[in-house]
Amino acid sequence: MTSFYDEIEIEDFEFDEQTKTYHYPCPCGDRFEITMVELMDGEDIARCPSCSLMVRVIYDPDDFQSEETSHNAIDFAKKTIAV
């Protein structure tokens, strides 16, 4: 079983537009990190690169679906199937 230092909402993280990475201060002095790609893949664990601490990120996975994925899902929902 994995042990987490804390559970933190994504809104409390700072977002770096250049690297597409969310950051949150770690007690060791570094920062927990999780990338936009990891969130889009359903990952919910932000890790500190300097120590062994991890936090669980609380977020809505639907907010991190790519436009293409959500667009395809909408298209499939609108198609009529003839029987």
Image (tube, rainbow, N blue to C red):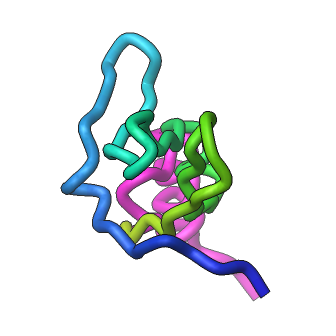
Is residue 70 on the magenta stretch? Answer: yes
State whether residue 15 is above or below residue 59: above
- If the image is split into quadrants, where does the N terminus sit? bottom right
**Outermost residue, left side:** 12
Question: Residue at the location (48% across, 48% down)?
Answer: 71
Numbered label tally: 0
State whether residue 28 is above or below residue 56: above
Magenta-drawn segment: 60-83
Asked whether, in this view, residue 16 is left or right of residue 46, the answer is: left
Question: Residue at the location (67% across, 77% down)?
Answer: 81
Q: Locate residue 54, reporting x and y percent.
A: 57, 60
Question: Residue at the location (32% across, 23% down)?
Answer: 16
- If the image is split into quadrants, where does the C terminus sit? bottom right
Asked whether, in this view, residue 48 is left or right of residue 17, the answer is: right
State whether residue 81 is above or below residue 50: below
Q: Locate residue 64, reporting x and y percent.
A: 44, 51
Q: Locate residue 14, reporting x and y percent.
A: 25, 37
Of residues 50 and 14, the one drawn nearer to the viewer in this rendering: 50
Is residue 4 on the magenta stretch? Answer: no
Of residues 82 and 76, the one drawn nearer to the viewer in this rendering: 76
Of residues 61 and 57, the one drawn nearer to the viewer in this rendering: 57
Task: From the image, give the main secondary structure of the stretch colored magenta.
Answer: helix
**Outermost residue, top side:** 18
